[in-house]
């Protein structure tokens, strides 16, 4: 199955963000933290219970929950 | 005419070394408090440079000037001069993390749009050097259109230059905003803030192109550290080890310091008692004021130690990892990973725990954590548990031969606090605190060595703000309670009480058969009344029973009777409002033992004996049975009998509503829990 959103990506892989769904506080915060369309994100790891996720983007590390990652659509733009 | 002080606002993302730069520029803050009406911390400092006085305003750490949280709103309001008492800044000093420029330029370029001169300080410049990140400072300054300076407070690099640049920038025309491309027309219309974020990152990519060069080697080392510390197995084990070390150090390192403080206060009390004549003034000073001061200062070692640990963990980047590792466990009950350390430290004492909740940026999560933190069984409950378990839980195994029943009860009391806290958090997060999903978007900062100066400053500031803000209130409360326990004074009533006690003991002695084991107890109590110490203790007990508090105890008897308590226990529970552990001392006084120290073996044994012998007024029925002991312990596990905790909740939330809510819900739960266990105990014939 091809991953379509960031929560389905396997650890260690690098993907490109296509879009961030919604216009609420969560979406705006993700965009402000640099999760913008076109940016490359590597899934560094997952916490012991599979949630939250550790991401690397724009040269820094960010942690978001699966619920939020599900709103990040990935694939070529 | 000398010009008035300049106002410079310090703006930056959380965790970029903003506090370090603040300390390097202005030293110890001249004022730490809250912004009016909100619980966002306000920190002011002052320095003089080239004859000008500069007031430095430390803004709360923020990622964006499109405000979403109260912290961010305060930052924006200060920048636009919309906060009473804080003049509009003459210059914004943006602190940007040199090791993470792309993300940090987001806020920096927003600052250019405020319309005030801007100076950008590249913090952690030394760390960036070590990581092989090279920044063309001159070119960045040219492209941003504002001065840019490298700063590294540990070596002093850039501090003097920052002062110069800030003074030079004041009065100059504000910088031109970074031009952003118009949002692309698309099928989905985005809110303005979202479109702006996308356009801004595109502009930042152009801004930094050719300005920042990084070699990948340092990142590799960091990757390796990260891979171990956030590993499912090793990461969790190391986490458990770190937490155990932190928790046990508060538990074991603080008590000797606390004993030292108590001993010092005792000596001071003894000295004052020797100098002042016996009377109301001496009693007020020793039993009211000193008791309050000692009850405040005694928390300082725990607060300072916890904040030392939190600052070290925060400084090296582990605090965010700890929240990352624990998040899943806590999110299920409506909390977040950042609640873990505050809740864990509440097992030692809720006060430093509640203060540690400052590290939780999200207001909702922070408030929920503060509200349930006092349910963790703190070290002040332990003496109550130990004495009552020791005296009234039978000395036998619980099912398994190696498992003593006393230990099961003790563990059960700790578990009770955790389970109730989880239930309360779950319930509140789905009702009162129900709202739109809160973003959990947490930066995992790079690994670095904590700076000793910053770590010490955090511990000092935490201890000082507690003493300053909570201390005065705790002392005031202690004086009020002293008055309630001392007045009204009526020697005739006390004399009558002691005479009645003597008579009732004599009657009991005459009525019991010679081989009754209680006979010796009655005889001993009667004989004690003939010694000066015994008489003084009995008079003190009588005075307390007839004080306002004693009357209140009788008054609340109908409320505590369903819990299996007599009015004396009710009275002791009321008197323990300043601190739970006081209940044992109060029981000692009420049961005519005088001032005993239940922490010492001798005092504990005496209290245990007296409690076992206690009977309901006018009957031969024993007060303390296993169900009653359990009911008292459950009550103390869940109640909010700790004035200091409530004062700190008030101070940390900036409102008196939350301590009142905490006290109310915990007292109701404590009563229900005590009632349930008492009834169950009676029904099962324990």
Image: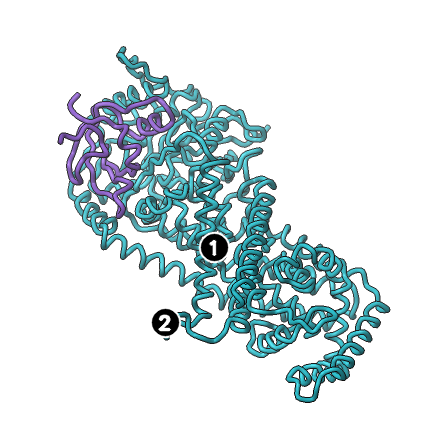
At mark 2, the secondary structure is: loop
Q: Quadrant of the C terminus of chain A?
A: top left
Sequence-earlier tag: 2 or 1: 2
- Give the residue at mark 2: B400
Q: Compared to B351, does B144 lie above or below?
A: above
Question: Could you tell me how far apart the alpha carbons at marks 2 and 1 are, in whole angstroms?
Answer: 24 Å
* Residue at image point 30% right, 36% down: A64
On screen, residue B436 versus residue B127, left or right, reads right
Residue B369 rendering spot, x and y as whole percentages: 46, 45
**Chain assigned cyan:** B
Residue B356 visible in the picture: yes
What element does badge 1 sit on? helix
Side of B155 where B370 appears, left or right? right
Give the chain ID for the purple colour: A
Location of residue B46 in the rendering, given as x and y in whole percent from the top left corner: 51, 39
Answer yes or no: are tags 2 and 1 on the same subunit. yes
Q: Evaluate if marks 2 and 1 touch, with contact meaning CB atoms under 8 Å apart.
A: no
Residue B165 appearing in the image? no
| Mark 1 chain | B
Q: Residues within 10 Å of mark 1 (few under 14, many from 20)?
A: many
- Determine whether, in the image, residue B283 is placed left or right of residue B372: right
Q: Which residue is mark 1?
A: B417
Residue B551 horizontal/vertical position (percent): 75, 59
Q: Chain of mark 2?
A: B
Q: Nearer the viewer, mark 2 or mark 1?
A: 2
Query: Could you say which is closer to the camera, residue B193 or residue B2?
Result: B193
Q: Residue at x 47, y 28 (%)?
A: B73
Rendering coords of residue B245 (x, y %)? 36, 61
Viewed as shown, does residue B220 lie left or right of B655?
left
Q: Nearer the viewer, residue B19 or B159?
A: B19
Q: Residues within 10 Å of mark 2 (few under 14, many from 20)?
A: few
In the rendered image, the quadrant that contains the N terminus of chain A is top left
């Amino acid at each position: 199955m091809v991953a379509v959103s960031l929560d389905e990506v396997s650890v260690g892989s690098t993907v490109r963000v296509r879009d961030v769904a919604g216009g609420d506080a969560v979406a705006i915060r993700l965009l402000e933290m640099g999760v913008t369309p076109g940016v490359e994100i590597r899934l560094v790891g997952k916490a012991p219970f599979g949630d939250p996720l550790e991401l690397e983007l724009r040269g820094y590390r960010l942690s978001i929950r699966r619920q939020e990652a599900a709103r990040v659509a990935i694939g070529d733009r | 005419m000398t010009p008035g002080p300049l106002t410079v606002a310090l703006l930056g993302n959380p965790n970029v070394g903003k506090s370090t730069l603040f300390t390097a520029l202005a030293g110890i803050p001249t004022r730490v408090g809250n912004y009016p009406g909100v619980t966002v911390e306000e920190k002011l400092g002052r320095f003089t440079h080239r004859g000008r006085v500069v007031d430095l305003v430390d803004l709360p750490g923020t990622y964006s000037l499109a405000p979403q949280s109260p912290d961010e709103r305060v930052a924006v309001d200060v920048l636009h001069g919309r906060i009473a008492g804080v003049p509009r800044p003459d210059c914004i000093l943006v602190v940007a993390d040199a090791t993470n420029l792309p993300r940090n330029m987001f806020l920096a370029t927003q600052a250019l749009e405020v319309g005030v001169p801007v100076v950008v300080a590249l913090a952690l410049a030394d760390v960036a050097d070590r990581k092989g990140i090279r920044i063309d400072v001159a070119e960045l300054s040219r492209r941003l259109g504002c001065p840019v300076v490298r700063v590294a407070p540990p070596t002093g690099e850039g501090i003097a230059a920052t002062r110069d640049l800030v003074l030079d920038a004041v009065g100059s025309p504000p910088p031109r905003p970074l031009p952003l491309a118009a949002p692309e027309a698309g099928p989905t219309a985005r809110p303005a803030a979202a479109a702006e974020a996308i356009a801004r990152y595109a502009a930042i990519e152009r801004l930094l192109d050719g300005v920042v060069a990084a070699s990948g080697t340092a990142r590799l080392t960091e990757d390796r550290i990260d891979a171990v510390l956030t590993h499912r197995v090793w990461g969790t084990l190391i986490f458990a080890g770190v937490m155990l070390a932190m928790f046990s150090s508060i538990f074991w390192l603080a008590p000797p310091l606390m004993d030292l403080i108590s001993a010092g206060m005792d000596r001071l009390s003894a000295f004052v008692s020797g100098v002042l004549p016996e009377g109301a003034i001496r009693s007020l000073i020793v039993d009211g004021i000193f008791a309050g001061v000692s009850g405040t200062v005694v928390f300082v070692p725990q607060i300072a130690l916890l904040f030392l640990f939190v600052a070290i963990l925060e400084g090296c980047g582990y605090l965010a990892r700890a929240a990352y590792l624990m998040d899943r466990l806590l999110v299920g009950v409506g909390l977040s990973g950042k609640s873990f350390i505050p809740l864990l430290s509440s097992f030692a004492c809720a006060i430093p725990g509640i203060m540690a909740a400052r590290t939780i940026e999200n207001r909702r999560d922070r408030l929920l954590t503060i509200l349930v933190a006092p349910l963790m069984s703190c070290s002040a409950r332990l003496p109550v548990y130990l004495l009552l378990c020791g005296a009234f839980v039978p000395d036998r195994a619980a099912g398994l031969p190696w498992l003593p029943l006393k230990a099961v009860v003790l563990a059960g009391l700790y578990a009770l606090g955790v389970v109730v806290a989880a239930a309360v958090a779950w319930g509140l997060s789905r009702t009162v605190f129900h709202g739109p999903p809160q973003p959990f978007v947490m930066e995992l900062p790079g690994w670095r060595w904590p700076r000793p100066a910053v770590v010490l400053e955090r511990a000092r500031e935490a201890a000082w703000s507690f003493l300053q803000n909570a201390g005065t209130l705790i002392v005031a409360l202690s004086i009020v309670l002293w008055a309630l326990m001392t007045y009204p004074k009526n020697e005739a009533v006390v004399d009558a009480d002691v005479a009645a006690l003597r008579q009732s003991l004599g009657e009991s002695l005459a009525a019991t058969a010679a081989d009754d084991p209680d006979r010796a107890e009655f005889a001993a109590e009667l004989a004690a009344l003939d010694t000066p110490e015994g008489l003084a203790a009995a008079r003190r007990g009588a005075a307390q029973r007839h004080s306002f508090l004693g009357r209140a105890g009788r008054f609340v008897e109908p409320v505590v009777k369903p819990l299996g308590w007599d009015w004396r226990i009710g009275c002791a529970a009321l008197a323990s409002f300043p601190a739970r552990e006081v209940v044992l001392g109060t029981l000692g006084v009420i049961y005519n033992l005088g001032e005993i120290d239940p922490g010492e073996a001798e005092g504990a044994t005496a209290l245990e004996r007296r409690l076992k012998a206690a009977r309901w007024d006018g009957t031969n029925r024993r007060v303390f049975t296993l169900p009653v002991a359990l009911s008292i312990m459950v009550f103390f596990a869940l109640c909010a009998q700790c004035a200091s905790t409530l004062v700190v909740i008030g101070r940390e939330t900036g409102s008196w509503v939350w301590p009142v809510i905490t006290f109310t819900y915990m007292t109701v739960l404590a009563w229900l829990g005590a009632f349930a266990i008492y009834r169950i105990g009676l029904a099962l014939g324990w």
